[in-house]
Image: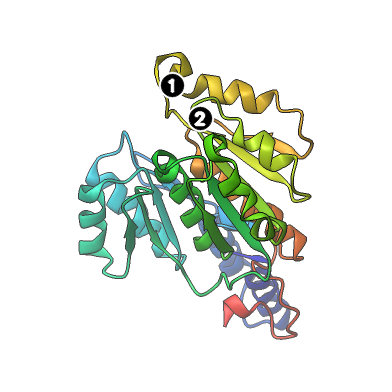
Amino acid sequence: MDEGSLDKLLEEVQSGHMSVAEAKAILHDVGYEDIGFARVDHHRTQRKGFPEVIYCPGKSLSQIVEIAERILAKQDTLLATRADEEVYDALKDKFPDVCYNEDGRIVYLKGDKYPSTEGTILVITGGTSDIPVAEEAAITSEVMGCNVDRLYDVGVAGVHRLLDNKEKMDGATVIVVVAGMEGALASVVGGLVSAPVIAVPTSVGYGASFGGLSALLTMLNSCASGVTVVNIDNGFGAGYAASQILLLAEGRNKDDGCGCESEEGCCGDR
């Protein structure tokens, strides 16, 4: 339940078209739903501006499908991360409209409540091996209603490739930099742009990269201002954070989901 829906509920009570007991039952229902093996957080949209996301590893197919079913009973948006083809097939059987990004290993269904932003999130990778993590970030941001542009395989081993796209970087509102190996790309980008940069270290690299730890430490020690770092391979976290930054920059927040100023309530409620 978002702010617009809550306003309507209170107006119904005030006008006498709904009893206090009925309103309490609805409000109690939108908190979370205990389904035995999980407690589905239906209140996540009101608090965070986006529904609960399913992290698939460690869950059975039946659990994933049931959680998705409970989410879609109250929302028109779904995001399931680290999903393989088997997960996609199971969800597709139940929800024919879901899509799958094979590179990003992410199943998604974008509802009408999240119209596209004016600003842009630019997702940059050092190499093509970083694309799976980058696509996880990109799809997450797109499903949250953000315009996303991509600039892949422009790492520091051939930094002229990056510099040739300076205009594209300057036009971005938020930049996500995904890189493995030594992870220097985030510092280079951070030193070239005024936009906030979210750095994602990946586990791409040879032995001394220690599964992404080397890139993580490089990014944490960046001397470029405006660079913040998420966990190794956490494309979802980067995409989510970038979206929050962009949505707040455009005056859209968790209360209404879209920032519209219609007297009839949020456009997502119509």
From the viewer's perspective, is residue 186 above or below residue 31? above
Give the residue displayed 20% in from the left and 56% down from the top: 89
Which residue occupies the foreground of this view, 169 or 40? Answer: 169
Give the residue displayed 23% in from the left and 45% down from the top: 61
Number of other residues with Cα within 10 Å of mark 1, as a class: few under 14, some 14 to 19, many 20 or more: some
Element under label 2? loop
Give the residue displayed 64% in from the left and 69% down from the top: 117
Which residue occupies the foreground of this view, 136 or 64? Answer: 136
The residues bearing labels 1 and 2 have C-alpha atoms spaced at a distance of: 8 Å
- Give the mark, 1 or 2, whose residue is nearer the N terminus: 1
Element under label 1? helix
Specify whether residue 144 is in view: no
Q: On the rendered image, what quadrant is the C terminus found in?
A: bottom right
Q: On the rendered image, what quadrant is the N terminus found in?
A: bottom right
Residue at mark 1: 211
The image shows a total of numbered marks equal to 2
Q: Position of residue 158 (x, y in %)?
A: 54, 40
Of circles 1 and 2, the one toward us is 1
Question: In the image, 257: left or right of 192?
Answer: left
Q: Amino acid at mark 2?
A: Ile
- Farthest residue, direction top: 208
From the viewer's perspective, is residue 176 above or below residue 144? above
Which residue occupies the foreground of this view, 233 or 34? Answer: 233
Q: Position of residue 204 (x, y in %)?
A: 42, 29
Q: Position of residue 24 (x, y in %)?
A: 60, 62
Number of other residues with Cα within 10 Å of mark 2, as a class: few under 14, some 14 to 19, many 20 or more: many
Q: Position of residue 226 (x, y in %)?
A: 77, 40
Q: Amino acid at mark 1?
A: Gly
The numbered mark at residue 232 is 2
